[in-house]
Every structure is written in C-alpha cells, then in structure tokens.
Image (tube, rainbow, N blue to C red):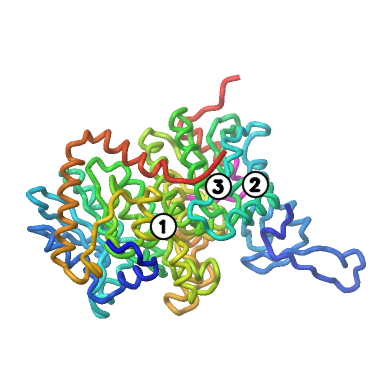
Amino acid sequence: MDEKKTAWERLQLVHTKGRPTVRELIPLIFTDFYEMHGDRLCGDDKAIVGGVAMLDGTPVTVIGQVKGRDINENKQCNFAMPHPEGYRKALRLARQAEKFHRPIICFIDTPGAFCGIAAEERGQGEAIAKNIAEFMTLRTPILSIVLGEGGSGGALALGVCDELAMLENAEYSVVSPRGFASILWKDASREEEACNIMKITAEDMVRLGVAETVIEEPLGGAHNDLDKISENIKEYLSLKIEEKLQKDIDVLLKERYTKFRKIGDFQE
Amino acid sequence: MGLDNFFDVVKKRLSGSAEDDTAVYVKCPRCQYQIVQERFEELHRVCPHCNYHGRLSCTERLAITVDKDSFHEFDSNMISCDPIQFPEYTEKQEELRRETGLKDAVVTGVAQIRGISAVVGVMDSRYMMASMGSVVGEKITRAFEYATEHGLPVILFTASGGARMQEGIVSLMQMAKTSGAVKYHSDNGGLYITVLTDPTTGGVTASFASLGDVIIAEPKVLIGFAGRRVIESTIRQRLPGDFQLAEFMQEHGFVDMIVDRKKMRSTLAHLLKLHGYAPKEG
C-alpha cells in the first residue's frame, strides 16, 4: 500500500480513464447476475444498477451507482448522479432482499445526487431521507463499498450499512471537493486545496469511524488489474457476509444503529 | 438580536416627513415589499403584501408556539469540537456563540402545547445557517431517543443550509444518525410533525426534515435539496420564481399543509389530539 499519496492525487486516480465501474466489476465478482429495472413509481434510473446474483453460493442483492467508461456511457447513466427514482429503485430492491433474506451489497461511486428541476420536483431530498431511514432497520445484512468517489447524501443513500469498506484510493466526502470550494470560498478553482483539507481518504474514513476496512488496490491503482481488484473485493465480501449472516438479526441492527450513533465530535 | 441578521435592512429616507427620516425599513426577500421594521415585528415577521413567513430566532419561535414557562431545554451546554481540524472553525464558533448567545444551531427540549407534552426542537438560522454538524446531529438524535423512551410526540421546526462543511464527513454521518433515531421513534408508534421554515435545504431536507408523519410548511418558505444557484449552474438556465417554495413543494406532493404562523399553535395542538395525545391531568 502506498500511503504517501495526497487526497488530491487519489482523486486524480479515481478519475483516471479505466477506473473499474460497477458494471465491469459485477460479472467478475458475482455469478448469475440478473438485473432488475424500475422503481415501480415513475421510471428506471440508469445511474443505479440493481439486481440479484450469487456470491460464492450465497444469493445476494447488488445495488450500485453506475459510472460510464466514456462520454457516451456517461451520458446514458448521467455521470452516476441518480434522480429520486434511482434511490427509490434501490429501496425497492433492498426491501425485496429483506423479504427473501438476502444480504445486500451496495457499491458507492457518485459525485452526488443529481441537482436539477425534475429531481427537485420528484423529491430528491425525500428519496434520500427515506433510504437512509429505511436501510437503518432492514432485517438483512448490508455491506457497502466505496469504489471511487462517494459524494454527499447521494452516496449516503446507499451507505447506511453494517460495515463500510473503501477501496484504497477511494474517497468519501460531505460534498465533492469542487462543491466544497465553491460553497465555502465561492471559488471552485480551489478544488485541490479543498480536497487536501477535507479529510476524505480511505485512511481518514477508518480514523473517523466511518469505514471499517480498506481494500487494497493493485500497484498504481485499481485500473491496472481488474481481476486482482475483483478478487480482493470478492474475498472481503465472502468473509464479511459469512460473519454477518451468523449474527442474530436484532444484534446486527443494534450494532448498525450504534455504528452511526457514535459518530460526532462535541463536548458538554 | 436585530432583524438585520435575517433580512436586508433598507434605510429609506422619505421626503417631507421629518419623523420618518430615521425610520428603518426591511425588504421582503420574496416580493421586495418594503415595510417599517417595527410594523414587521408586530406582524411576527410575516410580509403583509405576499404572506412570506420570515425567519424567527429559536427564542421567538418557542414564545409563540409552546405554553408559557413550559419549555425545559435538553443539552443546553453542548458545543461542537473540530473533527477535521478545519482552519479557523473553532474561532468562528467562539465568535458566533458570543454574537448570538446560542451554543449551536438547534435548541431541543420538552414542552407543553395547550397542555399537551411534546419534545420540541427549533433550528436557528443565525448560527452558521443552521447547518448540521455534530451538535445538531446529537441533539436531534437525543431528542428522538428521549421521545421514544417516554412515549412522546416530536415536533421539529426545521431550517438549514444543509450539512456543515467544516465538519466534513462527520456532518454527513449526522444524517444517518438522526434518521435512524427518527425511524426507531416511528417504529415505536410515535408521532413526528415536521414544520419546514425558511429555508430548509440540503442534508437536513435529505434526512429528518422529510421524515415527518405530518409535514407542515410555512407560506412561501424555501424547501429543497439542491441550492438554486447549483441547479442554475448545472442546467444553465434561470429557474422560475416559485421554484422550491412551500406551495411548489405541496403541489408536487411533499408537504401536507401550509399553515400561517398565527394558526400554528392551534394546528399543532389539534394534530396532537387527533393522534391520541392528551393534556396532562391537573
């Protein structure tokens, strides 16, 4: 593991062409993946992929934010920025997973929820809030992994889980560094400076109690060896699913609540 | 705390009237109507021209909402630390605490509304635009946990610019923490009424503000996830004037009722009663 890289250097890595997307990783990690479409309310958001699959003999539900490999794919999936119907599709599939006692695996990779007129009209805030609240009490194990970037509530909507893992170069933040610079300093060009003071690396996440595990990337970054990174993710998932499935569900839910309950830095 | 913390204060000189020379006017942010500050105060900061409901401090809000002397505050000394060692955050907070007399952006406690007990929380936009950091997250969470434990309803007056950037990822996690506490309160059968006040946006809209069993909004207040400027720069076009106002959100199905300030106390009392909560005996 190369721990010398700055947050900014890691962000560049995450934005490198060839960084594995969830659609590339799914067939390498799982077998028999069947994709499911739509939120049953309004539409099918291509910024979120979801379905059922087999992980080492265990049926699981897979949900993830979709980045494209090129500009055309990115236009299709809206650069991994979901609309409310994407989050509602995720919730529908998560509830389905709960019904059939399947663990849920979420892949986070988004700059944030989409900011637009239609997204507001259809309740972007409500959709995210509902996911966060509902995921907290879903009676099945939930594991989330940040693949590249996890930005704002749009990431957290798939981030309420029993354990969070970060790929070694992945980053998780309250808002994208660009957004941060633009909101706080009214100057988006100070993105690099923002990135380096925001504490958004995998290491920061473990230190702040947000993530439990860092998944090692191949030398130079995940894009250098898709087989290797898939193998590392699969190994992690198999181990954790086994562990979580053995737990009493009420204990698991209590631990899930406590994981978030204890995050905060205040004095009285 | 003067009005200038909430509005642009317009000093207007009226010709021919010596007395009015020094009158201080404020401008309604919705319709630009100008009104003498004293009159506006008398109207509890409701614009007489367009009915926009202006921002109140938490003290003012409690005074017009809960029974006199019934409010018992929780966690009144909680202050935020500096989880990501953000430059000048500690200094900024010290300064704000001095200026506003507040410890952070929310006040929570238990009170009576027409004799009915409820856990009540009020956010105050004077403190860093009522952004949610560790203190807001912890106090809201504790308020719900207290209500769950004591079988009480919760009423929150929300206002917020969103997550508190200066606390980084820790502020984002407060969305999960608070929403989790809301969920357990709900699963336990507790009533939660949200009153959306100006402005309720960002991470607060995307967490506890949107989770009420009943969602009330004050007229003409701003409610949304993304900020107007962010959307305009994303889609490169101007947004209509009523976009993200309470009436717009009701039209799109996200607000149950829009209630005037002068009817808020009675509306809340009736709703509490309709959900089976009764005044204390004696």
Q: Secondary structure at mark 3?
A: strand
Disc 1 from disc 2: Cα separation: 28 Å
Residue A193, given in percent of the width and then of the height, sits at: 48, 70
Residue B71, given in percent of the width and then of the height, sits at: 62, 34
Q: Could you say which quadrant of the image residue B35 lies in?
A: bottom right
Q: Is there any visible trace of residue A109 in the rendered image?
A: no
Question: What residue lies at 64% left-to-right and 66% top-to-bottom?
Answer: B29
Question: What residue lies at 30% left-to-right and 71% top-to-bottom?
Answer: A13
- Give the vertical position of A203 relative to B106 (above or below): below
Which residue corresponds to mark 3? B80
Q: Is there any visible trace of residue A59 in the rendered image?
A: yes
Disc 1 from disc 3: Cα separation: 25 Å
Give residue B102's mark: 2
Which residue corresponds to mark 1? A125
Nearer to us of marks 1 and 3 is 3
Q: Which residues are magenta?
A: B256-265
